[in-house]
Image (spheres, rainbow, N blue to C red):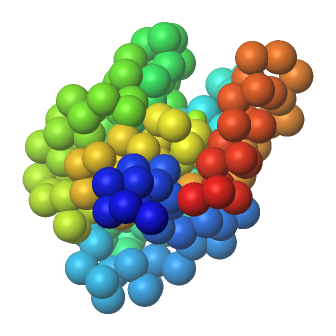
């Protein structure tokens, strides 16, 4: 295979695939020089249609802070109030309308976190937004399984395309 296609494939390949945020080994990430966590909100941190933060997620965030990580919520959500509320609840900077996979939200997140790409990870549930976007700017990408089953047809197609890409790439 040509080098070009290999590069394209690599853009769609998560560096790590886990079931959910609780399965990630943060000691290991820390030992690799990671100091900053860029987090997707919907279906990564909390289910898409839920506006509350569960105690488990609250504790997960508190533990990451205790471990010394800087966190930032970077969402494509069109709902500013929801994103703001979740950010304030967790006391973490939060942005909506990130337009991932475009690089702007990632650059902005790095600025907020005062981190270089090599010191950051992106954790998200969407291959074509979170993972592709992180890979494009050389941020370590962690893919989690989405928390809500898809019922809306276009989203089901998107998930099928994700599965196809994950198998192929
Ligand atoms: Mg998401």
Ligand 1 shown in quarter: top right
Query: Where residue 132 sits: x, y (%)?
Result: 42, 44
Query: Where residue 63 sits: x, y (%)?
Result: 48, 68
Q: Quadrant of residue 67?
A: bottom left
Q: Up-down: is 96 above or below 166?
A: above
The quarter of the image holding the C terminus is bottom right
Q: Quadrant of residue 125?
A: top right
- Left or right of 59 in this view: 116: left
Q: Quadrant of residue 161?
A: top right
Query: Where residue 128 sits: x, y (%)?
Result: 51, 37
Q: Which residue is depicted at the point 65% across and 66% down? A: 18
Q: Which residue is depicted at the point 30% across and 29% down? A: 102
Q: Which residue is depicted at the point 69% across and 29% down? A: 158
Q: Up-down: is 151 above or below 2?
A: above
Front in this rendered view, residue 25 or 136: 136
Front in this rendered view, residue 53 or 137: 137
Examine the rendering and report whether any part of residue 67 can be seen: yes
Examine the rendering and report whether any part of residue 71 can be seen: no
């Amino acid at each position: 295979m040509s080098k070009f296609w290999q590069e394209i494939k690599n853009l769609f390949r998560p560096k790590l695939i886990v079931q959910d945020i609780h399965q990630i080994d943060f000691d290991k990430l820390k030992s690799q020089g990671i100091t900053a966590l860029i987090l997707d909100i919907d279906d990564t941190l909390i289910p898409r249609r839920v506006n509350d933060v569960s105690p488990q997620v609250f504790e997960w965030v508190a533990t990451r802070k205790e471990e010394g990580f800087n966190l930032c919520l970077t969402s494509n959500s069109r709902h500013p109030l929801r994103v703001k509320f979740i950010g304030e609840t967790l006391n973490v900077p939060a942005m909506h309308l990130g337009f991932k996979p475009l690089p702007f939200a990632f650059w902005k997140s790095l600025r907020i976190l005062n981190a270089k790409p090599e010191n950051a990870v992106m954790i998200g549930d969407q291959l074509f937004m979170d993972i592709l976007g992180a890979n494009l700017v050389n941020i370590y990408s962690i893919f989690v399984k989405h928390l809500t089953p898809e019922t809306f047809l276009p989203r089901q197609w998107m998930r099928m395309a994700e599965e196809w890409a994950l198998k192929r790439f």
